[in-house]
Image (cartoon, helix red, strand yellow):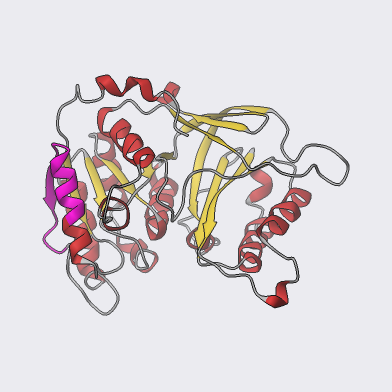
């Protein structure tokens, strides 16, 4: 899925990384997975620094709002190569007004890569809207590195690319789809140059519409994923982006993984593909499928806010950002 993994033999020429683990969202309940994730990073040779409140708990949150804000600002001040969230959940949208965006942008300039998924979308998009700084959509400690057994090898390879500065892009195979009603292929061959890559969790992104924390991206490549949302709810969230004018301004919409839902008898054939088919009738931009990203083990790392190119040939798609660095 990720391209050019033959460069991994030179993967460790940058030496071990300083990784800062913090909890900006939900409380960590699975302490064993938390410890496994840290041990795994240490076994890879990295220096892991754990935030003082990484295991704090206040109702469902990893500490109260002030505690989590302080943790985000400590991560920014840590000088770490990578600031990795322990887990997602919920908790960032309510503290967006208190985040010192300039401090985070300065940390990014100094070389700290912020990595996360799910609820972390809120921080990534707010930071992009406020400062233009690039962060990474990618794994979380507990759910991805703390699994029992081996973590996904593609996710690990992409993480290694980030650690070593070798990541240049991600290629994947889209679903085989029936042609459109007029006989045209569901996705035509395309090449998009110099577009801003942005997006993340669909529900979190929609919660930012109409706020100062949603970046106003013209001609972007928007990627979306979600978990535990029934197809009709996914469609309802997409209609919000459609009616708000967000979708018509993009050069492409890339759908990641949508999982963790159950169809009901009432649906009578209305499924996720129904939503994709409908979306293609609503916007001119191509709608691509099956990006390996979301609440699934196999996830690539994507630079949110970076300039990318996107190519599609048949079912093969590639998002490339190697020229951006």
Look at 14% across and 32% down and name the residue there: 16
Q: Is residue 129 left or right of residue 53?
A: right
The magenta span reads 36-53
Q: Is residue 5 above or below residue 281?
A: above
Q: How many marks?
A: 0
* Residue 63, image x, y percentages: 21, 71
Q: Residue at x 80, y 42 (%)?
A: 179
The x and y percentages for residue 306 are 44, 35
Pick out the residue farthest to the bottom: 59
Identify the image quadrant of the C terminus: top left
In terms of depth relative to the viewer, which is nearer, 295 or 148?
148
Q: Residue furthest front?
A: 149
- Residue 297 is one of the magenta-drawn residues: no
Q: Position of residue 108 (x, y in %)?
A: 28, 39
- The residue depicted at 38 percent of the width and 49 percent of the height is 127
Q: Position of residue 224 (x, y in %)?
A: 54, 51
Q: Is residue 262 visible?
A: yes
Looking at the image, residue 223 sits to the left or right of residue 42; the answer is right
In which quadrant of the rendered view does residue 217 lie? top right
Observer-nearest residue: 194 or 166? Answer: 166
Magenta includes 51? yes
Residue 166 versus residue 155 in the image, above or below: above
Task: Name above or below for residue 122 compared with residue 268.
Answer: above
């Amino acid at each position: 899925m990720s391209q050019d993994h033959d460069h991994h033999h030179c993967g460790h020429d940058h030496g071990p990384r300083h990784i800062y683990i913090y909890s900006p969202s939900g409380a960590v309940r699975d302490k064993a997975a938390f410890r496994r994730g840290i041990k795994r990073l240490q076994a890879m040779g990295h220096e892991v620094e754990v935030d003082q409140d990484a295991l704090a708990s206040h109702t469902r949150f990893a500490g109260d709002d002030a505690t989590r804000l302080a943790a985000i600002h400590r991560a920014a001040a840590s000088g770490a190569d990578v600031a990795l969230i322990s887990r997602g959940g919920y908790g960032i949208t309510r503290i967006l007004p208190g985040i010192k965006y300039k401090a985070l942008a300065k940390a990014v300039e100094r070389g700290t890569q912020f990595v996360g998924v799910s609820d972390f979308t809120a921080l990534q998009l707010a930071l992009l809207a406020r400062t233009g700084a690039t962060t990474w959509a990618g794994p979380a400690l507990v759910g991805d590195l703390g699994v029992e057994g081996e973590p996904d090898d593609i996710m690990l390879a992409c993480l290694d690319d980030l650690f070593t500065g070798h990541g240049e892009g991600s290629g994947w195979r889209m679903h085989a789809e029936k042609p459109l009603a007029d006989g045209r292929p569901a996705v035509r061959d395309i090449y998009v140059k110099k577009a801003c890559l942005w997006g993340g969790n669909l529900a979190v992104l929609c919660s930012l519409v109409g706020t100062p924390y949603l970046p106003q991206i013209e001609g972007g490549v928007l990627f979306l994923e979600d978990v535990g949302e029934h197809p009709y709810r996914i469609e309802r969230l997409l209609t919000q982006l459609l009616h708000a004018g967000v979708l018509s301004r993009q050069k492409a919409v890339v759908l990641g993984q949508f999982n963790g839902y159950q169809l009901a008898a009432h649906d009578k054939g209305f499924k996720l593909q129904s939503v994709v088919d409908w979306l293609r009738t609503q916007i001119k931009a191509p709608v691509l499928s099956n990006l390996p990203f979301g609440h699934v083990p196999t996830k690539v790392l994507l630079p949110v806010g970076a300039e990318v190119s996107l190519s599609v040939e048949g079912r093969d798609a590639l998002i490339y950002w190697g020229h951006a660095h």
